[in-house]
Structure formats: structure tokens, C-alpha cells
Image (tube, grey):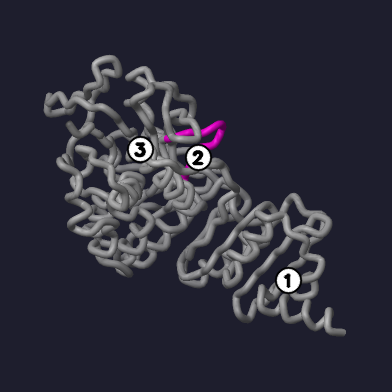
Amino acid sequence: MAQKLVIVGAGMAAAYLLQELSRLDHGLHITLIGEEPDACYNRVMLSALLAGEAAESDLAMLSTDQLHSPNRLLTGTRVRAVNLRQQTLLTDNNETLSYDRLVFATGATVATPDIGMSGVEGIRVLRTLEDVRHLQCVAAQGRRAVVVGGGLLGLEAAHGLNGRGFDTSVVHRQPYLMNRQLDAEGGEHLRERMAQSGLQFFLQASVAALRASDGKLHAIVLQDGRELACDLLVFATGIEPSMTLAREAGVACERGVLVDAYLHTSDPNCYALGECSQMGTQCFGLVAPVKAQAVVLARQLAGADGPAFALEDWPVQLKVSGVEIFSAGSVQSGDEHLVLRDAGSGVYRHLALAGQQLVGAVLVGDKRDGIWYAQLIRDAADVSGYRSGLMFGKAVSEAMRLSAVAA
């Protein structure tokens, strides 16, 4: 009899896992359960959908056949409890399902502050397809939106709202944008580029209070007393792993669901994958590590051999409001810095070296050769032969190195 695999969560992590399982001979009876009415779509593209730059069909991560490859697909269904001893779970429809192996792929939620938001109309997060559908129905003309959070999630939300026609501002508590990926100058360069599209920014600021009339938001108050007119407040302040279901079942959790290098949890029949998981001290909010986890877990579930999941310093490459961004390593750890500023073309590049090794790279406005820089950092390669052309990428570096050798 086929083993019963239940996947709780039908987001991007589950989609990557199903993609990988479809490539293997696994013989599993799969049940996929998701709380949302929509399953396995690309959350990264939600801002593009909001801005009108993508259609809902563009967000699909699985083909029709792949989406229906699970033997059973339950959408709009919440798992209320898991019984580890009996290997069963209970849904909000009071249905009891049994499993041989269970995968927690419950994702994450947007962190929001406690500022008395209950009952106030005009406050949202941008996390789901339903959130976008709601915002698409809100008239934007003449309306003022404030996004809290100047990281990737916040800037994507601001770009989407700006594209919808909202007069949009970003409130960010740090001194520069995308402070986890960029340096101060790179963050300022990004702010200047995004401001050209009409976005306003309030840095080193946070929301202290709301102003509402008849239950409708009309302004926010910053911690320094400034008041910003606001009809729509969107929180994109980072994510918190959704681990309540696993923790209440008795699975070991800290910031997320604790896993080993093969994605096992503390229960021998349970695994965790994606944003809800934690390995060592690290949780996962980027696509690259989640895809790598899915490869490892699919092999585990199919009984196939394969390497363990290894923690890495994954590079970040993306496009925010049309601005290309790439970041790898840590520019703060360098003792020598190469910087290129080209205001005319909107390009900023910062390469950091320690001795003869490249240790960090920040590229804003042009991410060409980013992968090459990341490989040099990962390999701890000696770049002394490339130094004179390093800023200009692989082809120029190779040409200058060969020219020097020939001379």
C-alpha cells in the first residue's frame, strides 16, 4: 500500500516540493492542504499583479497536471490540530486524516505592531492573492497609501500601489532602504531611483499611532510627532514563521520549526519546509534556499539518495520598481573597497576585498556578472589577477588578465 504523505500548506514551498517529486519515482499518496482558496502561486509576483504588470495566470507555479498530481487537494481548509502519536490531523471541517509522513509547509505571516488597529478600516497586509484582489477593488485616484517597511516586501508593495495610482509613501525605521542587502550608499541610490516614480520616503521613522474617524483611517502619527495623511496603511515589515500548528502538536520550535539537514523535525514522521522552518539559528525568507530545501526533501520522501541541505550565504538578485539589485557576501567585512558611481546611467557598484579575495558585492541599477561575483566569493578565489578589471565584470577582467600575462 502506498504511503500517505500530507503536506500542510499550499504556498511556494509546497509548489517547489511537488515540482521535485514529479521528477522522482515516489509512489506516495499525496494530500495537499491549503488555507487559501488559491494554491501554489508565486507570491514574489504579487506586487507586479497589483501594479497591473502581470495577470493572475502568470503567478501559477504548477501546470494543471502538476497542480492535480496530489491524490487529494484541499483548498480553503485549515488544519486545527495534529496528533503525533496517532499520526492524524483534524481540519476545520472536523475531518480526520491519517498520514505516514507529514510536511509542515505553513509559510509565514507579516509582522505587525500593536498600535490599536482593531476595528479600523483601511489597514492591510500584502501577502496573499486575496489581499491583491481586495486592493484592486479599492479606488486609488486621489487616495494616499503608506507602506510600513523599506525591505523587499515593503518596496514591492509600494511599487504595486504606486502603479495602481495611489499617492504612496514608505515608512522605514532604518536609515536606508533594504538595509539587510545593501550598504548605505546603495540604499540611498535605490531611494533616489524609486523617488523618480513619485514615491516618498520617511526613513528612521516608525508608526506610533493612528488617526481614524467613524472607524476609517485618515492619518498616521510617526514616533517623532509628524502626521501623515493616509487612507490605506499596508504593513510589510518582515515575516514571522507560522509554527503554531507544529508547536501545539509538540514538535520542537524556536523562531521556526526546527529541522536538521534533511528537513526532519523532532518527530521522526514529520518534516518542515520553507519559511516556517529553522535550521540552526537561521530562518528562510528567500526563494533560493527554499528551492534547495525542496530538492533535499523530495529525495528523502522518495527514498532516494542525495546530499543534505547546507546553509549558505545566498546571493540576492531581484528587480524593485524596475531597478536591478544584486547583493552577495558582506561589503562590511572588506578592508579594501572598489566603488563605481554612474549617476547618468543610474548605476552603483561596490566591491569589497579582504586581502586577495572578493568578500562582498552590492550592485544597484545593473546586476550583470553578479553570479560571477557570487561564485568568486563562495570559492574564496584569489582575484589579484583580475583586480584592474574586476569592477567591470568577468569578460573585461579576463581580457585584462590575459593582456597582462602576454605583456
Q: Is residue 238 magenta?
A: no
- Mark 2 and mark 3: Cα distance apart in space: 13 Å
Front: mark 2 or 3: 3
Q: Residues within 10 Å of mark 2 (few under 14, many from 20)?
A: some
Q: Position of residue 156 (x, y in %)?
A: 43, 58
Residue at screen point 53% across, 49% down: 172
Label drawn at residue 308: 2
* Residue hosting label 1: 390
Mark 1 residue type: Leu
Answer left or right for 24 relative to 147: left
Find residue 220 and report its horizontal and vertical position in percent.
43, 46
| Label drawn at residue 113 | none
> Could you tell me how many numbered marks the image carries?
3
Q: How far separated are the C-alphas under marks 3 and 1?
A: 45 Å
Q: Nearer the viewer, residue 49 or 220?
A: 49
Of the image marks 3 and 1, the number of the one nearer the N terminus: 3
Residue picked out by circle 3? 303
Contact flag, marks 2 and 1 (Cβ < 8 Å): no
Q: Residue at x 77, y 66 (%)?
A: 338
Amino acid carrying mark 2 in the image = Ala
Q: Secondary structure at mark 3?
A: loop
Quadrant in the picture for residue 273: top left
Q: Is residue 389 left or right of residue 107?
A: right
Instruction: Decide: few, some or many residues near mark 1? Use Cα within 10 Å; few <14, some 14-19, many ≥20.
Output: many
Residue 278 included in the magenta stretch of the image? yes
Which of pointers 2 and 1 lies earlier in the amino acid sequence?
A: 2
Q: Quadrant of the N terminus?
A: top left
Quick check: 214 above or below 153?
above
Could you tell me the amino acid type at mark 3? Answer: Gly
The quarter holding residue 395 reads bottom right
